[in-house]
Image (cartoon, rainbow, N blue to C red):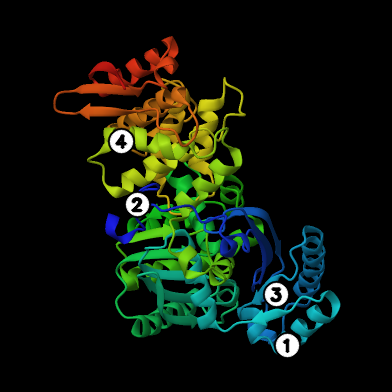
Amino acid sequence: MMDDTTLPQTTDWGPFGRPLFNDPSSKALSRVGVVDVGSNSVRLVVFDGAARSPAYFYNEKIMCALGEGLSETGHLNPEGRVRAISALHRFQKLAAGLGILPLTAVATAAVREASDGAAFVAQVEQETGLKIHVIDGKEEARLSAQGVLLGWPASYGLVCDIGGSSMELAEIGGGQVGRRVTSALGPLKLRTLPGGKKARKDYIRETVAQLAETMGQQRNRLFLVGGSWRAIARIDMERRNYPLHVLHEYRMNSKSIDATIRYIAENDPADLRARCGVSSSRMALVPYAAEVLREVVRTFHPHDIAISSYGIREGMLYEQMPQQLRDRDPLIESCYFAEAKDARIPGFGKLLYQFVRPLFNSAPLERRRLIKAACLLHDVSWRAHPDYRAEDCFDNATRANLGGLKHSERVFLGLALLHRYKNSRSGTSFEKIFGLVDERTQKQAEILGKAMRFGAMLWLQKEQPFGELEWHPKKKHLTLILTADAAPLYGEVAASRFQSLANALGADSEVRIKG
């Protein structure tokens, strides 16, 4: 539970602090390119925008399977090696064109374990100029855990990152990474393990038990990082007919994991792959990864399981952040950035937040955080066609690449922004998604949206207060107090929107002019 005392306080900006994206230490991270040379894939990600909650300016993955056959031969997969070098040539050329050299590159299990791994790294540097840092398993675990912290600064629990040739565990809490351990439980290795399914099951059980001895009890949240876990989550969504296809912060539990593993076994892999949008190379590894996940869950008994789309690449960005930036709320920082970039009157969101706050005086900090985010985003979609603006706002909020948001919080934010442009939420194509929050939460989002819809009618200069709301929930009475300067803005349309807000509150209303 967050508390006001844990966040930076200022009289102007509230408990969420002044935005930092224009600070020199943040601007230095405005566009950063990282390369992850994994056992299964080689990927380039270019981060851009608000450094604390970056957008993915460019993201390209090549499935090279460098670790294929490594257990038998001790060498990198020859075909995969050719593909990886070709991909790295391309990534260096792209980075030069974008002006973001040098790239930060790391290689994980396959390269560090292969007898020709060092030769591969040397060849890459000679041919492309890209210097690859080969990291050990514990460092891989640390970076992956830092990636989770990029999205959830106050998160705690166990991070489980599965790659092609290895699986890492790391504990997180208080913004720090604690104990870490690595293992050979990657699906590329498991599918070539001699002895068949029984031998594989015994090996997985024994290995996870050894990991548990090092990590101790870890019954808090389990964060799943890696492509195989994301593929299992996609299949879980398909099995449940889950309406919001956003993997980041998707939640599962031990029962749903067991049900999905049975679902995988009962369905044709090709059909399942097509329905869930999983690549054939990834789908081939899913059954082995599922066996590992079942044992991890049975051993550690987490109370909650969350998918993290943030991992080692995001951890590499987090590594470069000053602590001042790490401590900030990724959602609020990204909303500040979006307002500065796209709103018609950047800075008005702060006034709007102050204006609507009296309606939510009893709201906990987690809800006020979402209210602040909505006010900052209230005008960033103004370029959309008026007939589609409300649904466009909902779609953007629920599907955007934002850190620090549960799915239910995405829906609240999306509904508030939908009601910023539309009185009714019925008749849209997103009604199934509304059900991810209860009726009371939907009503609170409607009230916020209608308050923003009305407040947006009262634009003055961005630093000039235009009035205030007084809300007496027991008396069900809403008062609008306007400044003399703002009084002429209270025309027919504004009056209609104020009445719509009062109706949503079930309140009587009055308007007063001061001064």
Residue at the farthest front position: 515
Closer mark to the observer between disc 2 and disc 3: 2
Closer mark to the observer between disc 4 and disc 3: 4
State the mark number for residue 15: 2
**Neighbour tally class for label 2: few under 14, some 14-19, many 20 plus, Cα within 10 Å:** some
Amino acid marked by disc 4: Thr
Amino acid marked by disc 3: Leu
Instruction: Return the residue at label 3.
Output: 66
Nearest to N terminus: mark 2 or mark 1: 2
- Left or right of residue 55, residue 476 in this image: left
Q: Nearer the viewer, residue 473 or 42?
A: 473
State the mark number for residue 441: 4
Note whether residue 21 is visible: yes
Check disc 3 and report its element: helix, strand or loop.
loop
**Neighbour tally class for label 3: few under 14, some 14-19, many 20 plus, Cα within 10 Å:** many
Distance of label 2 from label 1 (alpha carbons) = 50 Å
For image coordinates 62% across by 29% down, the residue present is 383
**Neighbour tally class for label 4: few under 14, some 14-19, many 20 plus, Cα within 10 Å:** some
Distance of label 3 from label 1 (alpha carbons) = 14 Å
* Disc 4 and disc 3 in contact, CB within 8 angstroms: no
**Neighbour tally class for label 1: few under 14, some 14-19, many 20 plus, Cα within 10 Å:** some
Distance of label 1 from label 4 (alpha carbons) = 56 Å
Closer mark to the observer between disc 2 and disc 1: 2
Q: Is residue 435 above or below residue 148?
A: above
For image coordinates 28% across by 32% down, the residue present is 359
State the mark number for residue 118: 1
Distance of label 4 from label 3 (alpha carbons) = 48 Å
- Corner quadrant of residue 5: bottom left
For image coordinates 31% across by 80% down, the residue present is 216
